[in-house]
Amino acid sequence: MGDALLLFNLNRPRRLIERSSLTHVASRTLAENTHRSEVKNPEGDRGTTQVNIVWILHFGRPPRRPRRPTSIQNDSATKPLVSRLALGYPRAMACPKSLGVCATLLLLCLPVAAKVHSVGLGGWRKVPYNAPAATSSPSPDEPTSLRVRPLVVDGQVKDWTTGEIHEITDRTFVARRAVKLNDALPDEAGAHWLWVLGPWLLVDRSSAHISVLHLPDFDPAVSEIVWFRDYAAYCGVNATGKHLYAVVSQLGVRRPLVAKALSQWTMDDHPTPACAPATWQRQPLQVVFHPTNSAAVSYHIFGLASALIEEGESPDEP
């Protein structure tokens, strides 16, 4: 009777499952195991299949063994992975590391708010100042003090400036630097501090970036710049120190727009100041230089496009 029942189970397993009073889970397990056994050995001995069916009906489904990897090479790079799979660790154990990596990448991709900087100028103060000797007999009208004020960035003093600033754009301005210089000789004891005029600084309010302007033929002791837009007009001394030049320079452009010799120049004997402040004219765009003891000379400037490049983000409002 038992053999007939087993043969009937092999030929018509679903009918037996439908008439059985087992649970749905046991019925599904019986059908899956029967189908797998028939597929693996369709023409072989059915004794193993019969024993499996009787075991499932009486004792339930046996526990599954962990599957071993079949296509992974057993080298040094994959040993940890093979051992983990061979021991039957669940695949979900690797999820925390994956989630951590994904979370880190997500944080890196999120937009970071730009830091807001505060740039300003402090109050005026007077410091001792000795103007460079322009002639063999210095004039008594030369100033003995210099008005300076600090350049403050994010609450810290970054540099010292003198004179008025010039606004280039709504976020960039230029200011003349004042330098506190040690004028002591090597054989003198202690420091001898002296305030002198320095180069011009370009300051960006948005990025708080400060850069020194290296203008062609600019001499801090001789040149007095008159700004218009991003143009600087001044009298400068060439590298040889023998000629006084009329110079027009534009920010962002390496070569000067105008560089014309005005007169001879000697370091020991020259007028002070070398030139009166230059005069700008908008239409047509031209600049007039007024060298001392010489006739005025004018130059036309062609092109109105600004070559200044401002780094960082632009303000939201125009």
Image: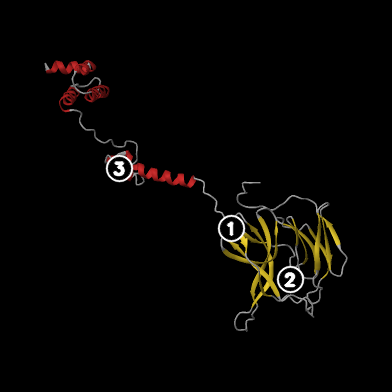
Which residue is located at x 63 percent, y 46 percent?
A: 317
Q: Quadrant of residue 36?
A: top left
- Which of discs 2 and 3 lies nearer the camera? The answer is 2
Name the residue that disc number 3 marks: 84
Verify CB contact (< 8 Å) between mark 1 and mark 2: no
Q: Find residue 146 and report its horizontal and vertical position in percent.
A: 69, 72
For label 1, the crowd category at 10 Å Cα-Cα, with few meaning under 14, some 14 to 19 and many 20 or more, is some
- Which of pointers 1 and 3 lies earlier in the amino acid sequence? 3
- Which of discs 1 and 3 lies nearer the camera? The answer is 1
Q: How far apart in space, not on screen, are marks 1 and 2 (Cα)? A: 32 Å
Q: Is residue 231 above or below residue 49?
A: below
Q: Find residue 318 and report its horizontal and vertical position in percent.
A: 66, 46
Q: Amino acid at mark 2?
A: Ala
Q: How far apart in space, not on screen, are marks 2 and 3 (Cα)? A: 77 Å
Number of numbered discs visible in the structure rendering: 3
SS label for mark 1? loop
Name the residue that disc number 1 marks: 118
For label 3, the crowd category at 10 Å Cα-Cα, with few meaning under 14, some 14 to 19 and many 20 or more, is few
For label 2, the crowd category at 10 Å Cα-Cα, with few meaning under 14, some 14 to 19 and many 20 or more, is some
Q: Amino acid at mark 3?
A: Arg
- Which of pointers 1 and 2 lies earlier in the amino acid sequence? 1
From the viewer's perspective, is 51 left or right of 42? left
Q: Quadrant of residue 295?
A: bottom right
Q: Find residue 306 and report its horizontal and vertical position in percent.
A: 72, 51
Name the residue that disc number 2 marks: 221
Name the foreground residue: 197 vs 74.
197
